[in-house]
Structure formats: structure tokens, C-alpha cells
Amino acid sequence: MLKEELVKRSPVRVLEKTIHGGVGKGNLGVITARKGVGKTACLAHLAIDTLLRDGKVLHISFADDPHHVESWYRHIFDELADSYKLENAFDVFENVIPNRLIIHFKQLDITFDQIRSHIQQVEGGIGFRPDMIIVDGRDFEVMTEETLSGWKEFAANQDAAAWFAAVLHRHNLQLDEKGIPAPVNRLSDLFSVIIMLEPRPDYIEMKLLKDHDNTASDKLHLKLDPRTLLICNHRV
């Protein structure tokens, strides 16, 4: 299969159609789940889809180091290439991966202003402007409305869509009246799209909890394959 056909048949097209064209430039989306369920894999799949469409991705990690992040991209790409029998997979990967920029922050107490300043300095130095921003490993237990608003403004200034990963409360699932779990529910007004990963016996269900200002149906008809960690079509 050629790269263009892979993009056309990608389950990410189902996601985009369901959420009315995607998260949208200047908007925020979040994938939330318990630790170890597959948030980073989902984000990597979304990022690779953007890269395969000749877009640019800024991946900001507050947890995994750059080498670990790179291994996620390599794993997801290899699984995609194998599943779709992608032609010239090595060349395709080598051609698209320069459009990905990974920035890793080790400091837990770093402020958003410091984060933004460093990113802008790095981007300015290499002339990089992303179409998608991935933010992984930020603690939503301490995320404030002011900080998340700063991220939203940053995405708008970059003319990019931004996806976050958020860890659910470990011991009990606390839902608000809209069915959105803590800790992201107190910040839900700032997110355009909210997706929760829910483990099932044989797969991981992707549940759509917020779809812009539309009434969200949790039936996204997508799942995460626990073996490959790819987003897949799923009819139930």
C-alpha cells in the first residue's frame, strides 16, 4: 500500500469525521485513562498520521525522555507499516520523521512561562512551526485553569491543534454530571474534545465524552488494540 492510501484508510479519518473535522487549530483535545492503558500510544498514532500527511508535530514530554518517545513513534509506525503492508516503509519513515520535534522537560516545578519561552527559542532557532502539538506527562491533578488557558493561547498562536494526555484518579472513577472523569472534568470547558480509554477483556474502548459544542455519543467506533497499541476501527 502507498502512503497516500494508508492515510486515506486510517481510522484517524473516522475520528476526524466523528468530531466534525478534528480538534481544530487553536483548540485542545485530551485523552484520559488510568496509567499504562495506552494514552501515549494514542498520541503517537495521531502524531504519525499528521506526519504522514506532511504535517509537522511538536511533541512535548514531561515524563519519557526523548529516546523513549522516539521508541514509541518507531513502534507505532512499524505496526502501521506491517498492518497496512506499506511500501518502502523505511524510506517513508526517514522522510517524515524530520518533521517531528521532541522537547523534554525534566523539572517538575517549571512554570508555563518558562516552558513557552524555551519552546519558542528552540522553534525560532530552527524555523519550526507545528501543525499538531502533543503534551504528555503533565500532572492534571495540579493543572490550573490559568495554565491550561495559556496552553490554549499558545496553540492558537502556533496555529496548531493540541492533544494532551491525562491520568485518571487511580482508586475510584469520579464522574461529573456529564460523565467526564476527574481530574480533567474541572477543566472540561477548555477542551474541545475529550476521549477516555476504557479497558475491556479483549480490547481498549475509546469513548468520546466531549465533541466541541455538539452532543457527544460515547460510541466512537474505535478501539485500541492491546497487542499492537494501534487505533483500530471497531463496530459493536
Image (cartoon, rainbow, N blue to C red):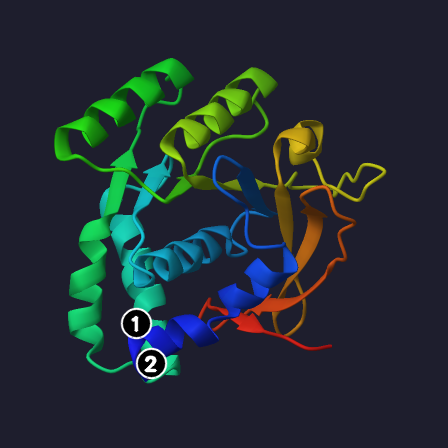
- Toward the viewer: 63 or 207? 207
Asked whether residue 5 is in view, the answer is: yes
Count of number-bearing discs? 2
Residue 34 drawn above or below residue 135: below
**Residue 183 can be seen in this image:** no
| Mark 2 Cα shell of 10 Å, populated few (<14), some (14-19), many (≥20) | few
Location of residue 213 in the rendering, given as x and y in whole percent from the top left corner: 72, 41
36 or 180, nearer to the observer: 180
**Towards the viewer: 203 or 162:** 162
Residue wearing tag 2: 82
Counting from the top left corner in percent of width and height, residue 61 is at 35, 38
Q: Is residue 205 left or right of residue 123?
A: right
Farthest right residue in view: 177
| Mark 2: amino acid | Asp
Identify the residue at image location x=34%, y=61%: 53
At numbered mark 2, what does the secondary structure look like: helix, strand or loop? Answer: helix
Q: Give the residue pinned by disc 1.
A: 78
Residue visible at 58% across and 19% down? 144
**What is the C-alpha distance between the residues marked 2 and 1?**
6 Å
Q: Quadrant of the N terminus?
A: bottom left
In the rendered image of this protein, does residue 157 appear above or below residue 21?
above
Dot 1 alpha-carbon crowd within 10 angstroms: few under 14, some 14 to 19, many 20 or more: some
What amino acid is labelled 1 in the image? Asp
Callouts 2 and 1 close, C-beta under 8 Å:
yes
Residue 189 in percent (x, y) is at 68, 30
Q: Residue at x 22, y 31 (%)?
A: 123
Query: Which element type, helix, strand or loop, lies under badge 1?
Result: helix
